[in-house]
Image (tube, rainbow, N blue to C red):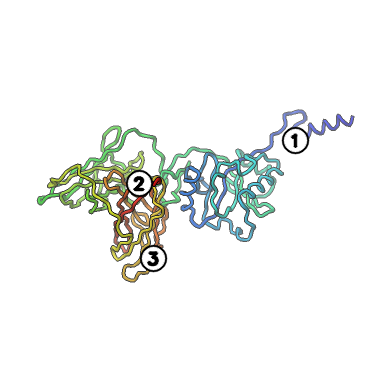
Amino acid sequence: MKQRMLAVLATFAVAGAGEWGQTPIARPAVRFHHLHYAVADPGAQLRPASDALQGVRTIVPGIGVGVRVEREYLLFARAPLDPDASSRRQQGAADLYADAVRWLSRRGFSVQPATLRDTLVARSLPRERIDHIAFAADDLPRALAAIGAKPASSSDVAATFRLPSGAIVEIVQATDRPDAYWCPMHPGVRAPATGKCPLCGMALVPIPPPRPGEYRLDAELRPRADGGASHLRLAVRDPESDAVVSSFVDVHERAFHLFVISRDLERFAHVHPSQNTDGSFELDHPLAPGLYLLIADFLPAGGTSQLVHRMVATPGYSGPLFGAPPPLEPGPDEQVAGGLRIRMTVESPAPRRPVPIRFEIADAVRGTPVTDLEPFLGAAGHLLIVDNDLSTAIHGHPEDTGTAGSSVTFAPVLPAHGRYKLWVQFQRRGEVITAPFVIDVRSEIQ
């Protein structure tokens, strides 16, 4: 009799709250969703985290910005995220994970994975302060009911709980919606819903379907009586229909950015033609006889960001069309232009990875750091980089929207070793100031 009663009790324990003899009720389950870090500059954390984890920079609606690896995230918010963070004991990532698993397990939850080392993001974790850890539930209301405690805070998509240790655990609604929006300037920043890019502040736009072919740039030059050209007319053609594209999305406050570079790399202009009703663009711009590279930067509606090259020879030019590229000799790392003294520092230049290029900006007369730079076309600065044969061109912006400081950093990815010429542009007191430099990118194998 005693043995039979023990068997009955064991059966009841497995069945839990279910009816007698029915299939046992499954334990509520959650899976690891993200670690949320509190940092001084969330945008600055995205690139190194994405590079280290080979993940996608993303925005999780209602939760934060960060890097996604499959269904796991590292998210970043500007410190302090939790106002009481300074008064509570800080835990390492592994200890925080174990503490959260113990707390959830005592409430009957099945947690996947059971340890931090089995997560994908554990391959590379930032050395920053962790504000909280989050787990995803397929049914958030049911999970919160199973916890049976009042959350410290809650919303439609998440609820947070403070553990006895002081750590914070967040339970979020599992949503694995596909990315449908991206930043036109930073296509690696993606999200399932609309929002703003954490790097440049631009509104995210719908990700267009892939299109075969490349957009083409037509260029017409109006000759000058004394040689050269005085006027440019440009048209962008659709890769499928060959029709003139007439609808564009403004990127950095303009629908069309045009860079004009002479073949000897001595002349440079960053200009913005006006659009006609037929979709073409026109601009009065004097060009002496010579060879010029036109670089058009634009985002066609329903397309992807484009950087299209077109070489033109102006009337009166009689030199070779395929001459040897001009040599690029390393020059000074400091230039004076427009009342500014601009000093360039390049950290460990190597191909196929981000190369931090920092510019320290001071008043050319007093030598004091400037604090009155102004936004130039929606950015703290603009940078154009070309190689000496003009086969590579990169239009970059700082991954920092602030302009008050005297230091501005870009991080372009250069495709190969060699020497590159660059032009950096800032705005101060309404004037756009341009300074040229040459950098030497060394091969990874010496």
For residue 16, which numbered disc appears in the image? 1
Spatial separation of the CA atoms under disc 1 and disc 3: 66 Å
Report the residue marked by disc 3: 371
**Kind of residue sitting beneath label 2:** His
Badge 1 element? loop
Please give left or right for residue 273 compared with residue 333 in the image: left
Spatial separation of the CA atoms under disc 1 and disc 2: 66 Å
For residue 120, which numbered disc appears in the image? none
Q: Earlier in the sequence, mark 1 or mark 2?
A: 1
Spatial separation of the CA atoms under disc 3 and disc 2: 35 Å
Report the residue marked by disc 2: 417
Label 3 vs label 2, nearer the camera: 2
| Quadrant housing the N terminus | top right
Residue 186 x %, y %: 41, 46
**Kind of residue sitting beneath label 1:** Gly
| Residue at x 18% of width, y 45% of height | 313
Q: Nearer the viewer, residue 172 or 109?
A: 109
Residue 269 x %, y %: 25, 53
Please give left or right for residue 8 compared with residue 371 in the image: right
Q: Nearer the viewer, residue 328 or 240?
A: 328
Badge 3 element? loop
Residue 193 x %, y %: 47, 43
**Which of the 4 quarters of the picture holds residue 147?**
top right
Label 1 vs label 2, nearer the camera: 2
| Residue at x 61% of width, y 41% of height | 140
Circle 2 residues within 10 Å: few <14, some 14–19, many ≥20: some
Please give left or right for residue 180 compared with residue 387 in the image: right
**Which of the 4 quarters of the picture holds residue 116?**
top right
Residue 398 x %, y %: 39, 54
**Which of the 4 quarters of the picture holds residue 18?**
top right
Q: Nearer the viewer, residue 262 or 16?
A: 262
